[in-house]
Image: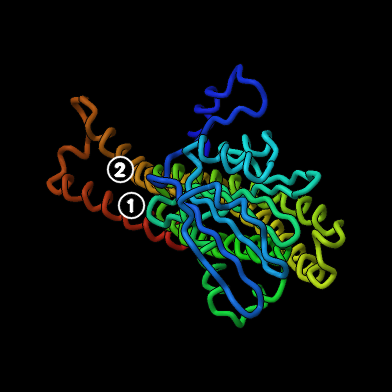
Amino acid sequence: MFKLIKHYSRKAGLPPGTLVHVGEKKIENVRIEKWEFNEKEIREQVIDSIASLALAQEPGTVTWIQVMGIHQVEVIEEIGRTFNLGSLEMEDIVNTIQPPKIDELDEYIFLVLRSFDYDGVGESLNGEQISLFFKNNLLITFEESENGILRIIKDRLRKGRERVRKKGSDYMVYSIIDSIVDNYFVVLENLIDKIEVLEEKLINDPDTTNIAVINQHKKNILLLRRSVWPLREILNSIMKYDEPLLAPDSLPFYKDLYGHVAHAIDIIAMVYEMISDLHGIYLSSVSNRMNQVMKVLTIIATIFIPLTFLAGVYGMNFKFMPELGWRYSYYIVWGIMVLVFIGLLVFFRRKKWL
């Protein structure tokens, strides 16, 4: 996400409500699907003409319009005009670095959400923005591509036995947010597994490349926190609504979801602390390794001090030194050096310095 911020300059100087796509092109052509369903039946179709979306809804039927691909701003603008959607909200749809938010409009509630997938190879998070408008029995979603989260919702709709077919658009919105939050837990689980492996590696074999991995994990958890933290406010705002936007029997589901979000925030805080501790573990492991090296070097130097002293004494260039005339003086000196060497090793081992 951070690399996309540099594209934000495209919007500089433009009046509010001007649609400029900020982000990556993740799908070649915009695809629009229309889903109409109730408890008894479901109809799905691919839309070729945006004008056909303006047809009146059937009573007792929920209509879901799924827009996949937001890079063609002229298509997004036409959809906005068809449903009389706010220009500021349409601007947020094509700005893919928008943080999660909720806007309360006269006819609609507008949400910006963000889902993530964890790339275990690159140790990075792949995020995708999901924007949606909803009112009584009408839901319009905008995605950068065909998101896996919404594919799950479509599969549940096709089964027919799911609760989502029996309720209105408010429950559809709950199902989408719930799937996104569930996926947050999957991402957090993967992150925790990676961090635990990295922690063990830092203890046993610290390496300078680990710093880059630690920083990547920190960036991931900050991105996740940026997306999860606003969900509490979003859910609080939705739960304040009454019928027809929010049915009374949907309120318990939102309350339960609020608890899940609070739990996710707690886990994110814990993971952030784990990542922060990794820096300390790395520095401590490097320091311990350096201490071990210095310990070995110190022991070697200590052993050679008396040996160097003996060699230095008998290496002095004096003419008269009694020991130099002894027949076995050379072997005696060697014997003394070996005894000193062995004695020091025994002493260090008894002190548990070796």
Query: Mark 2 and mark 1 in contact (Cβ < 8 Å)?
Result: yes
Tell me the SS state at disc 1. Answer: helix
As shown in the figure, which amino acid type bears the numbered disc 2?
Answer: Leu
Q: Give the number of the disc on residue 340.
A: 1
Does residue 307 sit above or below 249 in this rendering?
above
The residue positioned 81% from the left and 44% from the top of the image is 106
The quadrant in which residue 139 appears is bottom right
Residue furthest to the left: 327
Q: Nearer the viewer, residue 79 or 70?
A: 79
User: Which numbered dot is residue 307?
Assistant: 2
- Whether residue 141 can be seen here: yes
Q: Earlier in the sequence, mark 1 or mark 2?
A: 2
Is 282 left, or right, of 13 in this rendering? left
Q: Residue at x 70, y 54 (%)?
A: 134
Q: Is residue 115 above or below residue 89?
A: below
- Label 1 Cα crowd, 10 Å radius (few <14 / some 14-19 / many 20+): some
* Amino acid at the residue labelled 1: Val
Count the numbered circles shown.
Answer: 2
Q: Nearer the viewer, residue 341 or 354?
A: 354
Q: In the image, is 274 to the left or to the right of 32?
A: right
